[in-house]
Image (spheres, rainbow, N blue to C red):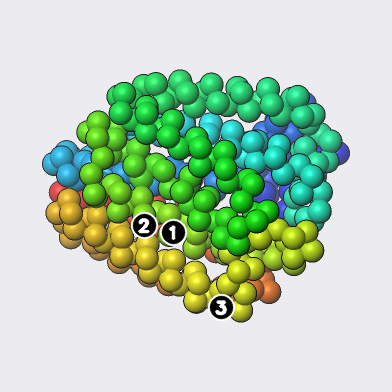
Amino acid sequence: MERPGTPSLPDAVKGHWADRWAPAGVRPYLRLARIERPIGWWLLLLPCWWSAALAAIAAGQPWPNPIHCLLFLIGAVAMRGAGCTYNDIVDRDLDTRVERTRQRPLPSGQVSLKGALAFLALQGIVGLLVLLQFNAFAIATGFASLGVVALYPFMKRFFWMPQIVLGLAFAWGALMGWAAAFGFLSWAPILLYLGSIAWVVGYDTIYALQDIEDDEIAGIKSSARFFGENVKLGVGICYALTLVFITAALTLVRAGWPSFAGLSLFALHLGWQVARIDRADGAGALRLFRANRDAGLILFAAMTLDCFI
């Protein structure tokens, strides 16, 4: 049962265990890490898993490295939480001006700034411990992402397409799986990274449709506002680029028919999303955004089947 005094945020999963069963003192910190919104760590994780599967196909392995995949899972949950905590620290004043975000733990006063900073450090330590399990090149590659992560929360103040910077950060895993497997990068993971960036820009544009009116009032820039009435076209272009780059990556590693069959299903899913976009339907936009987890899992499952066959 939901405890009084800690209302769920509008985009949280209804009835999530973090809202129902977590101790009252812990719950605001779980919300700061977006634990009750698992779609975020799924979307951070999937490019890592794609990259691990791409590396396995290239190496002729029967499946993606399971230890790496588990480490990426732990790291995605920790670093997504750390990124959200950092974002909320930076945006704590802006969040008070947007309906969907003003009940977040920091702007609502449920968590102090000092508490948020300590929680950020704790999550960062978990992420570091995960990263240190990989080879030296992968560790360096992981550290290289921090600059982009640090930059993102500030971009919405002056850059009309902050989703591009988010994509640079959220798609970084497309490099990590390959780096962890081989200790270097090549064109295949770079193309996968470019495709993942375009995917992030597309789905986060859909997500931003929820806030378009409040963002205009608060002066927050987003790709949803930038595309305006042409948002379907904008997302469609992003998704088309996603498919072009991922096709090129799979071609370079001589992927088999399961990977391309999975990519076709992935493409159909992305096309369905574009067809269903409605600028006036915030709830529908959230459903479409969340559906990208399933789209990404389809592609990963197909690439894993390709390894096995």
The kind of residue on which mark 3 rests is: Asn
Q: How dense is the environment of label 2, judged by Cα within 10 Å: few (below 14), some, or many (20 and up)?
A: many
Is disc 2 in contact with disc 1, using a CB cutoff of under 8 Å?
yes
Q: Describe the element under mark 2 as helix, strand or loop.
A: helix
- Res. 289 image quadrant: bottom right
The N terminus, quarter of image: top right
- Res. 195 image quadrant: bottom left
The kind of residue on which mark 1 rests is: Trp
Does 102 sit above or below residue 264?
above
Q: Residue furthest bottom?
A: 229
Q: Describe the element under mark 3 as helix, strand or loop.
A: helix
Task: Count the numbered circles shown.
Answer: 3
Q: Give the number of the disc on residue 230.
A: 3
Give the camera-side residue of 220 and 205: 220
Can residue 143 be seen in this snapshot? Answer: yes
Q: Give the number of the disc on residue 195.
A: 2
Q: Earlier in the sequence, mark 3 or mark 2?
A: 2
Q: What is the x, y in percent for residue 62? A: 18, 40
Give the camera-side residue of 191 and 33: 191
Does 204 sit above or below residue 110?
below
The kind of residue on which mark 2 rests is: Gly
Q: Earlier in the sequence, mark 3 or mark 1?
A: 1
Residue of label 1: 199
What is the spatial separation of the Cα atoms under label 3 and label 2, in whole angstroms?
21 Å
Residue at 56% across, 78% down? 230
Q: Describe the element under mark 1 as helix, strand or loop.
A: helix
Give the camera-side residue of 12 and 72: 72
- Res. 19 image quadrant: top right
